[in-house]
Image (cartoon, rainbow, N blue to C red):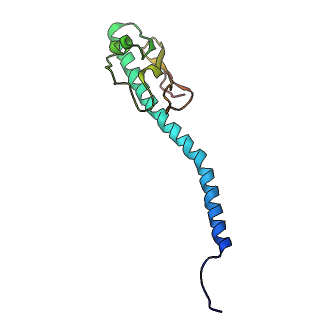
Amino acid sequence: MTGKKGFTLIELMVVILIVGILAAASIPLMRGRIDSAKWAEANATAGTIKSAVRVYYAEHGTAITGSLGVAATQTALGFTAGDLTGTYFVPGDYNIVSVDANGNARITVTGSQANAPSGSKTLAVDGTWQ
């Protein structure tokens, strides 16, 4: 007997199997975090739009609604070309659905880009992201 030290083939295969199981379990968890990060961009931009709508309402006494894909709506709110274009969302993805008596807007976001997360989310009048 020579007393060689090392791992057997079975021990190495068990380790590889465990690592594979852990990797397979973590992929769905990471996918959810990626979509959450993408929606954070939409939430931030929708908040900026909500602030602009409130300023518009305070200055003009009337509400402005509709798609931010319309250049006239962007101009009325003080945005220039490219201000609302992000990595995952473009201006046409944002829609001002309604404005309450205090100038608070409800904004719906639906991703249209290939790399955008699926579905729609809404920035409610009270500021919650649903």
User: Which image quadrant is residue 60 in?
Assistant: top left
- Residue 83 can be seen, yes or no: yes
Q: Is residue 58 above or below residue 16?
A: above
Q: Is residue 54 left or right of residue 27?
A: left
Q: In terms of depth relative to the viewer, which is nearer, 128 or 102? A: 128
> What x and y, as percent, mark residue 50?
41, 21
User: Which image quadrant is residue 59 in?
Assistant: top left
Image quadrant containing the N terminus: bottom right
Give the residue furthest to the right.
Answer: 10
Residue at the (45%, 28%) spot, across then down: 89
> What x and y, as percent, mark residue 47?
42, 26
- Residue 57 can be seen, yes or no: no
Q: How many numbered callouts?
A: 0
Q: Is residue 3 above or below residue 111?
A: below
> What x and y, as percent, mark residue 44?
42, 30
Image quadrant containing the C terminus: top right
> What x and y, as percent, mark residue 127?
47, 25
User: Which image quadrant is residue 53 in?
Assistant: top left
Give the residue furthest to the bottom.
Answer: 1
Residue at the (41%, 10%) spot, across then down: 64
